[in-house]
Image (tube, grey):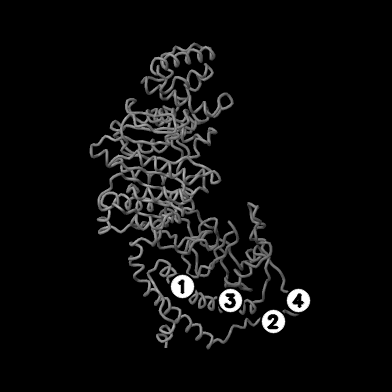
Amino acid sequence: MAEWLIASRLGNADPTELRSELALFGIIALRGRFTPWQLVETLGSLLCLRRLDGRPLTGGTNEPISGAEADTTLWSAVLRRAERIDAEDDFVLRELRSLDATAAPLARLAEDLVEAAYDERGAYEWLLTARSRLGLDSLAADAVAPELRRLLIQLTDLRLRLEHGESLTLADPHARAGDLLAALLYDTEDRDRVAVLAADPDERLARITRRRLLLAGVSELDLDIQTGPDLEERLADPDLIVTQLPYRPGEDRSVFAALAEVERVADLLRPGCTALVLGPADALVDELKDTEASRLRSALLRDNVVESVIALPGGVLPFRPGYRPALWTLTRGPVSEAEGKVLLADISSEPLTAGVRMRLAEDVLLWRAEGSLALDVHDPRYGRVVPVADLDRAFGGPLTPPAPPASAIWSDKVKERPALIAEAAARLERATADTRAYEDEQGPYRGGVLRRVGRLPRRTTLGKLTAGGRVTRLPGHRVDERHLTADGHHAVLGPEEITGERAVGVRRIDRLVLATEYDRVALTEPGDIVYTLTPRLGLYVDHDGFSVAAFPARVLRVNPDASRPLTPHVLVALLGAAPGTVRSPSAVRPARRIEDYQLPDLDPDEVLRFDALLAEVEHRERLLRAQADALAEARCLTIDGLADGTLTLADPQTRRFNRT
């Protein structure tokens, strides 16, 4: 099936992805024979052996016809190669020795992975990406979101350092499966000038990291992956340290222990070395209640190694959505303009998008390069530069910006707030005057409703109105999202616009695209009713017309020349009040078709009076909405200005004098 899909080029999946999925299907099928750990360790060892030997795993075995004999011969050849190439058991030998010939199918699957990914490194990374699907959730629990991973890569500035001809040593004292180190190496092509120091207490994870970095292109002589809780600087002094503190549940988490781990990282720094430490926000950012922990954090700040403190949003560790992380960047011997100061940033209240990441990285990198000189040409978008002495006096206080960034305080939007509030107040006065004038002309709202005496109006259905020619149903049209713009000639009305989830007019389509790609599309006419039953009943009167109803939305058109005519507003009101139109939360279909909606068949003169009443109500709603919108805008602007300290309030007597 996979080969047929690849050959016929059907569907949207890339051929490489299809081949990878086919190999994964075979790997998952072996979970009854091997544990998830055995699958990941053995396949990684086989890929590493293939790289070290430079030959395919299944090549030159002269396999006999019998399946069992073929497996025995293949596995014996694999073991001989492993004993010859990895005699000291640094990478693969023990994992392959722990299994017998029943693991021979894994060698063939490893070849399939390499064929799909083009090389051993891509095959291993793809396998580790699928570790949760193999049942190794514990191995994926520390994975970070893609945007956070890109932020860490940007903050190391590894590519620029290597472009300047430097040879660097990367380090991670808490490597786990090597995710952060592998991400850094993936971002550069100059891996021949990179050495790696790493450590992890779990020997299995340390060996996974060792194999992973070897496949990533790091030379054997430049690899020192240690097993244990401490990182010994046996290979070289680190130039860049990127680490994630081991996760501990909130009930067992020690703030002091987390800060002690940060101190250990700081002890590894030599002049010019940079470290990024990802850890719990309650230790790195929040206010501290423990005196001993407060002393340790103050000591780290006074040691002049803390470059920036960043409060990150929740959810950047997908497997632990309730965990609140923070990031410290450390530098030993910062530029003189940054001594005695720390950049504090807080993005915990907004998602870590590409734009936020780029602006935040720019703040930190400019601060690292120029210190306070950067403030002359660049105001940090998310941070505030705070003297360490002020933080030390607060002793244990939160490491969050004391005020919004200067770029936010002095932005044009902030400067124009008083004028914008005055404009909103003027609109409020005009809207209030319009409302008073309308009430003076029309009088107060009465409604003019009376209790009906006598027989109730007979019932009808929308289906009968359609069959009688009083209403016409028109289909909606399927519109490709790629053809939608914000400045086209025709508005596109879909379920989101009709139910109010999206403003009408946000999605538009160009008339030339409409003419060339949708030659059978019929535009709406003024007064048409665009409706949807998905995800719920929604009705919208298109007063202007010339719009496109996007399926599953459809159109109802009232016939004004019928013997008993309706008006669009009356029909919308009656359909919206029809019984049985609400869908059960568990239902996948509406309770009934719209043709079966029951509504009263009002007399023509009653329809006209009802339409006039609805028009009056809509007009009064517009007048009141104009007042509410102007007042809401003035309120929001005032609150924002007082919250960030850029506005203050005049004395009540002064305001009263100005009004008179």
Say which label, 4 or 1, has the lower sequence index. 4
Mark 2 residue type: Leu
Assign a secondary structure to mark 4: loop
Assign a secondary structure to mark 1: helix
Q: In this view, does 209 lie above or below 407?
A: above
**In front: mark 4 or mark 2?**
2
Q: In this view, does 257 lie to the left or right of 451?
A: left
**In front: mark 3 or mark 1?**
1
Assign a secondary structure to mark 3: helix
Reading the image, the residue beneath label 3 is 614
Q: Distance between the residues labelled 3 and 2?
A: 16 Å
Q: In this view, does 338 lie above or below 138?
A: below
Q: Quadrant of residue 258?
A: top left
The numbered disc on residue 450 is: 2
Question: Which x, y percent locates residue 367?
Answer: 30, 52
Say which label, 3 or 4, has the lower sequence index. 4
Q: In this view, does 538 lie to the left or right of 649?
A: right
Say which label, 2 or 1, has the lower sequence index. 2
Mark 4 residue type: Arg
Instruction: Name the residue: 53% across, 48% down.
Output: 322
- Badge 4 crowding class, 10 Å Cα cut-off, few under 14, some 14 to 19, many 20 or more, is few
Mark 3 residue type: Leu
Reading the image, the residue beneath label 4 is 455
Mark 1 residue type: Arg
Say which label, 4 or 2, has the lower sequence index. 2
Q: How far apart are marks 2 and 1 (CA)?
A: 41 Å
Q: How far apart are marks 3 and 1 (CA)?
A: 31 Å
Quarter that holds the C terminus:
bottom left
Q: In this view, does 449 lie to the left or right of 39?
A: right
Reading the image, the residue beneath label 1 is 635
Say which label, 3 or 2, has the lower sequence index. 2
Q: Do the residues labelled 3 and 1 touch (CB within 8 Å)?
A: no
